[in-house]
Amino acid sequence: MDQIKIGKFISLKRKEKNITQSELSEMLGITDRAISKWENGICLPDASNMPDLCKILDITINDLFSGEVVDMKDNEKKLEENLLEMTKIKEQRDKELLALEVFIGVFVTIIMIACIFIATFINMPDWLRVILIIIGIIPFAIGISYAIRIEQIAGYYECGNCHYKYVPTYKSVLFATHINRTRKMKCPKCNKKNWHKKVVSK
Ligand SMILES: [Zn+2]
């Protein structure tokens, strides 16, 4: 996907509609700096802004990704190319998220162990020990629930029985028995409770 081309295309279409950057930003409920970033090819619009942006500029999502108005006869081919690229971008992002999950998990675990270790082995008043343990446990609890949230939304879980891939609810991920990222959950398709593997691609 050519960000510069997409940016120029957004700018062109906006000017054709006689809309200023700040007017467009108001319509989308975002800052005009974001618009200028898109138009300069620094970043792509968020997926959540794309439908409204396309409606305002009178283009299709496919046109937007292609950075030009796509000819009807090329439409299907371009759409396929763009979808493929979107999938790759999502897979890459999911991999990064899963690496972040590991980092958060390790980080808060180290903090907790360090706090408990100090509270156990170093001489200090009891109230200080309690506070130290609380200081260790709170980031751990927050960090782990955040890490599980990342694991839930990044990529998919694959049912070991029917190989259906899906994104489960936070609750079912949180309460599932697990070995690393493989979790025992009930598959929404075949309804069997079995081990689900984490996968990045669908
Ligand atoms: Zn299944």
Image: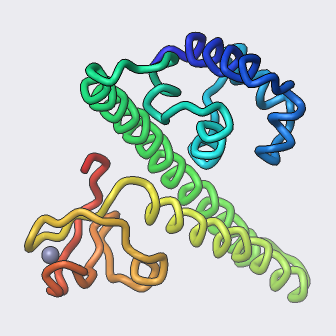
Quarter the N terminus occupies: top left
Q: Is residue 4 left or right of residue 60?
A: right
What colouring does the structure picture have?
A: rainbow
Residue 132 rendering spot, x and y as whole percentages = 81, 75
Q: Is residue 139 left or right of residue 185?
A: right
Count numbered badges in the picture: 0
The answer to which image quadrant residue 51 occupies is top right
Outermost residue to the left: 161
Look at 51% across and 59% down and name the residue there.
150
Q: Nearer the viewer, residue 179 or 76?
A: 76
Q: Is residue 160 above or below residue 23?
A: below
The answer to which image quadrant residue 78 occupies is top left
Look at 86% across and 25% down and name the residue there.
20
Q: Is residue 171 above or below residue 109?
A: below
Look at 81% across and 44% down and name the residue there.
27
The answer to which image quadrant residue 186 occupies is bottom left
Look at 77% across and 28% down and name the residue there.
35
Q: Nearer the viewer, residue 176 or 191?
A: 191
**Image quarter for ligand 1:** bottom left
Q: Nearer the viewer, residue 128 or 178?
A: 178
Residue 97 rendering spot, x and y as whole percentages = 50, 47
Q: Is residue 101 above or below residue 68?
A: below
Q: Is residue 117 left or right of residue 74?
A: right
Q: Is residue 122 above or below residue 98?
A: below
Residue 39 rendering spot, x and y as whole percentages = 71, 18
Q: Nearer the viewer, residue 5 or 124?
A: 5
